[in-house]
Image (cartoon, grey):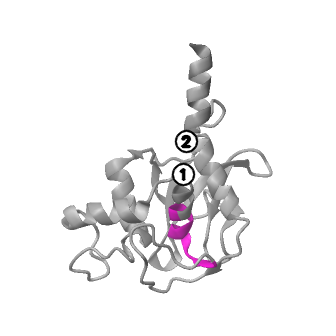
Amino acid sequence: MRKYLFLFILISGLSFSQNFSTKLSNAALELTKDKVVYDPAYFVLKYPNGDVPADKGVCTDVVIRAYRKLGIDLQREVHEDMVKNFSKYPKKWGLKRADSNIDHRRVPNLQVFFAKFGKVKPITNNPNDYVPGDIVTWDLPKNLTHIGIVVNKKSPDGKRYLIVHNIGAGQVLQDCLFSWTITGHYFYQ
């Protein structure tokens, strides 16, 4: 029986050593190897599984791309929920209906989606509450929103996990968890 279980695990791609959080963390870290220019331009995207050009992106694209590496298409999932539940999503941009090209590229939309379908975790000042695979959102100066992924690499002082995000310098690994006001803390699988 054990032989068949091992064979099933091997065939299905499951691993005893890697849970979802670790896989998401590793996917995010892998993104830091790609040279990406910060570009918030509106793109017409092939839907589903559309993506901005690989050498362009913003903070939300880091999250979208990391999840895509795990076979989860947030572009499709967010858009389909927005079509069904448009009134539950922010109206900051004056849209009258869902738009598959941009819905998933807006932090407030991802916050609503993660709160609805994921796990909302507490916002605290305790670095131990933020673990690899968590999604964190922030308010930046000038009322801008931001999002990143907590990964399994520690800060130089060993007190907190690092973040993979794109705030203007491409997809980078940075010690920035408490650099801005945290507005959301989620886990989505």
| Other-residue count near label 1 (Cα within 10 Å), few / some / many at <14 / 14–19 / ≥20 | few
Residue at image point 70% right, 61% down: 173
Estimate the x, y position of residue 151 in percent, counting from the top left.
Answer: 65, 50
Q: Quadrant of residue 84?
A: bottom left
- Residue 96 covered by magenta stretch: no
In the image, is 162 to the left or to the right of 107? Answer: right
Magenta stretch, main secondary structure class: helix
Estimate the x, y position of residue 183 in percent, counting from the top left.
Answer: 45, 59
Q: Which mark is residue 70?
A: 1
Labelled pair 1, 2 in contact (Cβ < 8 Å): yes
Q: Which residue is mark 2?
A: 20
Q: CA distance from mark 1 to mark 2?
A: 9 Å
In the image, is 157 to the left or to the right of 80? Answer: right
Viewer can see residue 107: yes
Estimate the x, y position of residue 182 in percent, counting from the top left.
Answer: 50, 58
Closer to the camera in the image, 68 or 28: 68
Q: Quadrant of residue 54?
A: bottom right
Viewer can see residue 131: no
The type of residue carrying mark 2 is: Phe
